[in-house]
Structure formats: structure tokens, C-alpha cells
Image (spheres, helix red, strand yellow):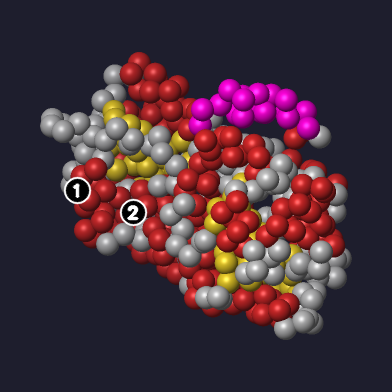
Amino acid sequence: MTAYLHLPKTFLHRVLLGRDPYWRQFFWSRWGALPEEVVAGCRGQKVVWIDALSGGEVMQSFSFCKHLRRLLPDHVLVLSCNSYDALKAAGNISGVDHLIDTPWDIAWVARRVLKQIRPAAVVCVQTPAHPIFLREARALQIPTVIVSAFMSADWPEHPTMARPMALNIFESVDCVGAKTGDDLALFEKLGIPFKRLEVTGDLKYDFEHVRLSTQDRDKLLRELGLNQSDPVLLGGSLNYGEEQILIDAFLKAKASLPGLRLILAPRYLDRVAHIEQELQKRGCRYCRRSTGAPMAGEPPDVVLIDTFGELGRLWAIATMGVLGVTLIPRFKIAYGQNIIEPLIHGTPVFFGPYARRWEKITGELEAVWPGLRVRDSDDIARGVVELMAKPDLLRALREKAATLADRQHGAVSGNARFVADIVRRQQDGCRGVA
């Protein structure tokens, strides 16, 4: 219904009056008219379609697609996303042959696109969101798969899952590769007879593409105008209102740590102009990531990230960080931003009361130092100053973070093998999996 309601407006603004070729193609792709080069590239080929909804799923797809390419070298890999920024980030994924917009979840649109691409399997990363699309794929005898699949006791009640659950989305899923044994048990409780259900690992733990060498880390610091000796506080994927909390905390801590620098990475890029105004009002010297640091003079107090898809690498240069969407939740069911990204780099993170998805991890971090759990800017400021005064504690937290991140090493290869096996069985004449 949403697609139909917006049809006149989007056609007028993006096709008739629009100048950006992306938005023009976005309109047609959403309605099932794919670019000819995509259709021609898939015609007569063995295709695997990977749907990575937005930024988080795209980040999990980097290493996964590379591994899948090694296992299925004679297949065409098509990756779909549902936003412009996600598609831009996905353009850097090695091994993907074609990028497209995820089509509208309408039966005739789904059938049209599926018949053009004719995939051997449709693979959803982490969470499926298009029940009609998956139903149509199944009707065409195309296996439907979730990799790095997430489930919690209250996930079906999450606002983003209201429509998918109302349309019984999991009944259109053939195979589930769950992140953990806990996720698998909760999938079993759904009572759906999946043809294959097993633990394949959490793709969030394997970020090969964001690990930086010493040279790359130094280069990134130079690009941001920061000195290697300056402590850096990073606020990652900040929700509306959390930017103000981080700025307040930074200014309070900087009174004791004059060399402290702040990196602000908002979750939504439409917040950048508002954050700039706040930084100007507070008298902070800042620069935008897209324009680069000043050529000369003192390093900026604050670096404002106005680009998409860089957060995973930025954690490598942070002395410590604050986990976004844990101080101010997005929804009533509050999970928090991905805590694995900073842990991969051994970066300790402060987190608020809304990090339910990561309770096992945050519990182990708190066992090393309870000060990581914070409520407001005062807690964060005190914690930053205390950590910088206790290098042994900071070192212990770094070691614990690295240990936690290494627990699911091999998750990428596990998920890639899971999909490759399903695809090969399908092509051998076994629909889905036996």
C-alpha cells in the first residue's frame, strides 16, 4: 500500500523532474524494471541473490560475499539493498557482480524481478523483511535462506517486524543459519518445520574488511587531522539526542584531558547540519569527514562523520567509545548498536541501559570494570578521565574486548558453506535441502 500511495509523488520527483540518475533508476528498479545490464548479466547464468536490507546487513556482507565467491566461482552474485547509502557502501564489496534496489514487496513486482534474475537461491542477511517476496520465490521453487539469522523472545513484537510477522514471513523461509544456539532454540519455538536449521555463526564477528594495519591506521589519523598521541573518544551510530550527550561528556572530560579528541558518527546523516550548529554554539573546533581536516594548525576538537559505511574502520583509531542507541533507544524494544565492531579492534566501549541484545557481552566487560555502564554525560566524562588515569585497566579492557571478538572466528566461512551447499543441492535436482 505504501508503494502505491507514494507512486505519483516519486514518479514526479524522481523520473519527470529528477536530475540524479540514481533516483530515476531507483524508481524503475523498485517496480521491477531492472537495468538491462543486470538482466543481461543474469540471463542463462547460475545466480545467487543476496538481500542485505540496510547498512548493518551490508557491513556483514563484505567478507561473506568474498567467501561465497570462492565457493561458487561460476555463479553470478546479485546483492540488493533498500537505501542509497547502503548501495554506495555495497559498491565496495568484492565478489558482487550486480547491485540492485530491493523491489517493493508486492506480488507482481516480486514475480517480475525473480523471473528476470532466476536465482538458484534467495539469501537474506540476518533478518528477512519482505514476506511477499519470499512467498513468491518459494512458489517459483527457489530456496529461501537466512544467514547469520537473529531471533530473540521479543523480536517478533518489534515494530519493524509487525508487517512481516502478520504475513507469516518465516513460513516462507526454507533454511535458517542461526547466529547462536540461543537463536536456533528460539527459531525452533516458532514451530515452523524449516527444511534445515543449524548454527552457522554470527557475521557481525568477522569484519576482515575493517581490520587496519599500522600504516592504514596512521593514514586514517592523518586524514582526520589527529595526532597519534591524542586520546580519541568515538560516539558510534548515535541516535537522535545522543550527540548532545556525547558533546557534553567530551567538554567535561576535556577540562581534565586537554588533548582529548571526539569523533561523532551519527546514525542518520540528516542530523549532520543540526550537530554542526550545536558544535558551533559550544565553541568546538571541528571538521567534517567529507571535507577533510585543516591543512595547518591545531587538530580539530571534533571530527564529524558525514559519510556512510566507515564506522567499522573508525573504531580502530579510538582509544575508547560510546555505543550508540544505548542511551536513547530507537524503539520500546531496545537492543542497541552493534557492539562487535569496536571489540574487533580491542576498543573498550561505554554503553547505556538499552543494550539488551548484548547482555552477555556487556556483563563480561562489566566484570572487568563496572564503570563501562553509563547513564548520562557525567558518567561518560568520569569514565573517560578514570580510564586515561589507569593505563593497566585500559589495557585489561582492550585484552578482554579482543578475546570476546575472537569467539566466533570462522562465522563467515560457516555461513558461506551453508549457502553453497544449499545452492549445489538445488542444482543437483534437490529442491531446498533434504
Res 173 → quadrant = bottom right
The stretch of residues the image draws in magenta is: 4-20
Q: Nearer the viewer, residue 255 or 282?
A: 282
In the foreground, 362 or 303 = 303
Q: Residue at x 19, y 48 (%)?
A: 228
What percent of the width, then of the height, locates residue 147?
A: 64, 65
Which residue was labeled with disc 2?
A: 316
Amino acid, disc 2: Ala
Horizontally, residue 308 falls left or right of residue 110, namely left
Dot label at residue 147: none
Can you give x and y, in whole percent of width and height, for residue 363 in the image?
53, 57
Dominant secondary-structure state across the stretch colored magenta:
helix
Residue 228, disc: 1
Residue 10 located within the stretch drawn in magenta: yes
> Farthest top residue?
281
- How far across and down, in percent of the image, does residue 55 sit? 54, 47
Residue at 51% x, 27% y is 19
Mark nearer the N terminus (2 vs 1): 1
Q: Secondary structure at mark 2?
A: helix
Q: Is residue 250 above or below residue 418?
A: above
Q: CA distance from mark 2 to mark 1?
A: 12 Å
The C terminus is located in which quarter? bottom right
